[in-house]
Image (cartoon, rainbow, N blue to C red):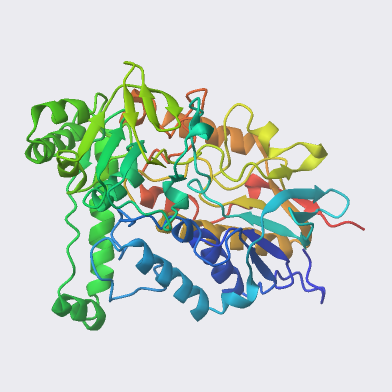
């Protein structure tokens, strides 16, 4: 990674970033802002936006307040409401990319098939499905955890005669007016689109595997006067971000201490949900049967009332099959449907897969993660030099903003590349003993928390929690604030 002029600077380091969402954009801005100009951003979508390009279903919004779910270096005072809708977030992200000149670095409509290490040169080749390739000294995988839609293998799904779609691939050409709609899944996306489309459909059947714990979110528009305060009064935005961080960290506090502070969170949620659910039968069906905080706590003041609409039915019997004209449940009942919508979330534990990532000795990342995904500080993996994962294993936040994590991560990646160049090395690779020790400490930190007390999408098939960070946002920021060179081997440049 030595500079072409022999100075040992990182400015000539070639970097390929896979993913053009918040993580990929943050990485490109950080690297280019520190003189690493040779950065290419690849994405399968035709536009910048990542998950906010694809998740355009009715009612789509972030459940993290926008003043925190945005870059600290690109604050905006004119968000329309507390938690902004998808079009606003997409416009913001694309606007930031344009402001920082990233359009010239963005290559759209690239489906990456493989990322391969050449051990002779210690460089990477990124291969697209259409045959195009890019060579790089370092690769940043910014595909995140919420990028690949998950559809359960229910018998007969291919036989359904009407339109069907996943919430993350919404087909806006499908007319739902007066239709019988079956919604399979009641996760965070369904909680948003169900109340958005319920008034227009003829009838809706919602199939629930397990209920959710809810906190209120009315999400009213900010008054124009308040937006003026955000824009014009010095210090208000900084204080607001500080306040929101503290509020969201309180959710993590509840999850980390389910038998004390968590009981207060459960009580608050219980009182809110009882007010929302007046029908005792709907309440019985919708009520969660697991520890508060074990699964994602959802924010909505509209979903539970939607379940009590005359044209909506909540079904908790297990779905056993899809038929040409509806859904069959284990009680033998047939539920007729004209349209089938999957609200079943994402393959959260697969990260960047199914792309092949091939490191030292021909070992794939799939093989390395055969017993569960793991990475030092959620970013670096032994055997994969100068390859970095953003929003990787154990960096999801149950009570915070992933943007805080991403900004800290990209600063760490930049430090790693700078240190590699300073040492005139070809690449850096995390030591296996360091990564294993970190993983043991991390997994031990889950003990006694609500995360361990049920099955959730935070776990892989073995039951190992691979998605979440077990502590607080600020603890992660401190942990990655400064690269420790002793944790890495710096591999010599080829002669």
Question: Measured from the top left, where is residue 343 in percent x and y?
Answer: 39, 41
Q: Is residue 360 left or right of residue 173?
A: right
Q: Residue furthest bottom?
A: 232
Question: Measured from the top left, where is residue 246 in percent x and y?
Answer: 25, 54
Residue at the spot 23% in from the left edge and 60% down from the top edge: 243
Q: Residue furthest top?
A: 331
**Quarter residue 383 falls in:** top right
Question: Measured from the top left, where is residue 364 in percent x and y?
Answer: 73, 38
Residue at the spot 28% in from the left edge and 46% down from the top edge: 194
Q: Quadrant of the C terminus?
A: bottom right
Q: Is residue 394 left or right of residue 82?
A: right
Q: Is residue 139 left or right of residue 467?
A: right
Q: Would residue 70 be seen by someone viewing this image from the given angle?
A: no
Question: Measured from the top left, where is residue 129 in percent x and y?
Answer: 73, 53
Residue at the spot 27% in from the left edge and 43% down from the top edge: 298
**Quarter residue 433 falls in:** top right
Number of marks in picture: 0
Q: Would residue 173 be seen by someone viewing this image from the given angle?
A: yes
**Quarter residue 378 falls in:** top right
């Amino acid at each position: 990674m030595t500079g072409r002029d022999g100075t040992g600077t990182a400015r000539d380091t070639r970097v390929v970033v896979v993913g053009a969402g918040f993580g990929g954009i943050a990485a490109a801005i950080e690297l280019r802002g520190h003189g690493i100009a040779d950065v290419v951003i690849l994405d399968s979508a035709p536009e910048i936006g990542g998950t906010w390009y694809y998740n355009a279903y009715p009612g789509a919004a972030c459940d993290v307040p926008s003043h925190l779910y945005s870059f600290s270096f690109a604050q905006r005072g004119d968000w329309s409401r507390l938690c902004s809708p998808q079009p606003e977030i997409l416009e913001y992200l694309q606007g930031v990319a344009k402001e920082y000149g990233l359009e010239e670095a963005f290559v759209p409509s690239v489906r990456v098939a493989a990322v391969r290490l050449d051990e002779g040169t210690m460089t990477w080749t990124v291969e697209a499905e259409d045959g195009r390739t890019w060579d790089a000294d370092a690769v940043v995988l910014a595909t995140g955890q919420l990028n690949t839609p998950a559809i359960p293998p229910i018998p007969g799904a291919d036989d359904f005669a009407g339109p069907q779609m996943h919430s993350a691939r919404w087909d806006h050409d499908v007319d739902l007016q007066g239709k019988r709609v079956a919604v399979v899944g009641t996760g965070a996306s369904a909680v948003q689109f169900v109340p958005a489309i319920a008034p227009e459909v003829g009838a809706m059947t919602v199939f629930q595997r397990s209920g959710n714990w809810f906190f209120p979110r009315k999400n009213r528009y900010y008054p124009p006067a308040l937006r003026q305060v955000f824009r014009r009064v010095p210090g208000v935005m900084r204080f607001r971000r500080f306040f929101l961080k503290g509020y969201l960290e309180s959710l993590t506090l509840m999850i980390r201490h389910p038998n004390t502070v968590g009981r207060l969170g459960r009580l608050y949620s219980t009182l809110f949900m009882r007010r929302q659910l007046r029908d005792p039968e709907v309440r019985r069906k919708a009520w969660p049967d697991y520890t508060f905080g074990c699964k994602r706590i959802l924010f909505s003041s509209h979903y539970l009332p939607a379940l009590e609409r005359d044209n909506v039915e909540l079904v908790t019997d297990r779905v056993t099959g899809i038929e040409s004209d509806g859904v069959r449940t284990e009680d033998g009942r047939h539920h007729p449907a004209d349209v089938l919508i999957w609200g079943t979330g994402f393959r959260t534990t697969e990260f960047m897969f199914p792309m092949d990532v091939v490191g030292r000795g021909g070992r794939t990342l799939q093989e390395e993660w055969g017993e569960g995904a793991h990475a030092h500080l959620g970013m670096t993996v032994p055997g994969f030099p100068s390859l970095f994962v953003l929003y990787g294993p154990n960096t999801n936040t149950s009570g915070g903003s992933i943007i805080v994590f991403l900004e800290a991560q990209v600063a760490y990646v930049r430090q790693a590349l700078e240190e590699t160049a300073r040492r005139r090395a070809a690449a850096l690779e995390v030591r296996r003993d360091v990564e294993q020790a970190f993983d043991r400490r991390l997994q031990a930190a889950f003990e006694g928390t609500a995360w361990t007390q049920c099955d959730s999408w935070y776990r892989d098939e073995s039951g190992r929690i691979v998605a979440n960070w077990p502590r607080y946002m600020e603890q992660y920021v401190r942990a990655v604030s400064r690269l420790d060179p002793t944790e890495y081997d710096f591999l010599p440049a080829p002669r």
